[in-house]
């Protein structure tokens, strides 16, 4: 399989895979290494690992992290590409008269199909 570097989809997938890999490595490191950290930080990490490994909190924390990651990535994309909103100027009767234009003709009424 050849990776095309110019393809935007490939870049998006690689960024998402990198984010997931960092989160997975962080979770695994915390689960395996919290016992070797001394002091209050070790106790705090042990409490976090205990809460994090509880079934409901594990899924909920991953949902919250996922939503947070999506919001951050979307914010960065919008800052880089700019807003995608378009403002349209709407002319009323006075503006059209000042602009020297005529109002558009009314749209033709839809006719019912006739049977032959």
Image: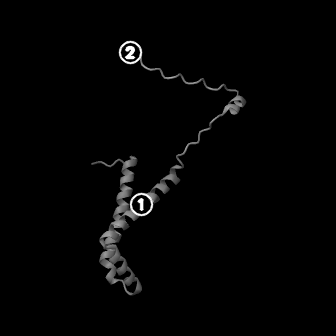
Question: Which mark is on residue 67?
Answer: 1
Q: Is residue 33 left or right of residue 71?
A: left
The correct choice, above or below, for 100 with respect to 90 in the image is: above
Q: Nearer the viewer, residue 107 or 83?
A: 107
Judged from this view, the residue extending furthest toward the right is 98
Q: Look at the image and tell me whether residue 55 can be seen.
A: yes
Identify the residue position indicated by label 2 in the image.
115
Provide the secondary structure element on which disc 2 rests: loop
Q: Look at the image and tell me whether residue 5 can be seen.
A: no
Q: Is residue 53 left or right of residue 112?
A: left
Q: Residue at x 32, y 74 (%)?
A: 29
**For marks 1 and 2 on the same chain, the one whose residue lies earlier in the sequence:** 1
Q: Nearer the viewer, residue 92 or 85?
A: 92
Indicate the position of residue 26 as horizontal and vertical percent values. Answer: 35, 70
Q: Residue at x 60, y 23 (%)?
A: 105
Q: Residues within 10 Å of mark 2 (few under 14, many from 20)?
A: few
Q: Nearer the viewer, residue 5 or 57?
A: 57
| Circle count | 2
The correct choice, above or below, for 22 with respect to 50 in the image is: above
The correct choice, above or below, for 93 with respect to 5 in the image is: above
Question: Which mark is on residue 106?
Answer: none
Callout 1 touching callout 2 (CB < 8 Å): no
Q: Residue at x 36, y 80 (%)?
A: 47
Rendered image quadrant of residue 53:
bottom left
Q: Residues within 10 Å of mark 1 (few under 14, many from 20)?
A: few
Indicate the position of residue 113 as horizontal and vertical percent values. Answer: 42, 19
Provide the secondary structure element on which disc 1 rests: helix
> How did the renderer colour the structure?
one colour
Q: Residue at x 66, y 25 (%)?
A: 102
């Amino acid at each position: 399989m050849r990776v095309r570097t110019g393809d935007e989809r490939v870049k998006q997938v690689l960024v998402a895979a990198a984010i997931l890999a960092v989160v997975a490595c962080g979770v695994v490191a915390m689960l395996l290494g919290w016992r070797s950290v001394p002091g209050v930080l070790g106790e705090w990490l042990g409490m976090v690992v205990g809460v994090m490994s509880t079934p409901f909190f594990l899924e909920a924390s991953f949902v919250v992290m996922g939503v947070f990651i999506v919001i951050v990535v979307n914010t960065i994309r919008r800052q880089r590409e700019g807003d995608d909103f378009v403002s349209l100027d709407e002319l009323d009767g006075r503006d059209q008269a000042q602009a020297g234009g005529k109002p558009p003709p009314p749209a033709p009424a839809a006719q019912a199909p006739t049977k032959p």
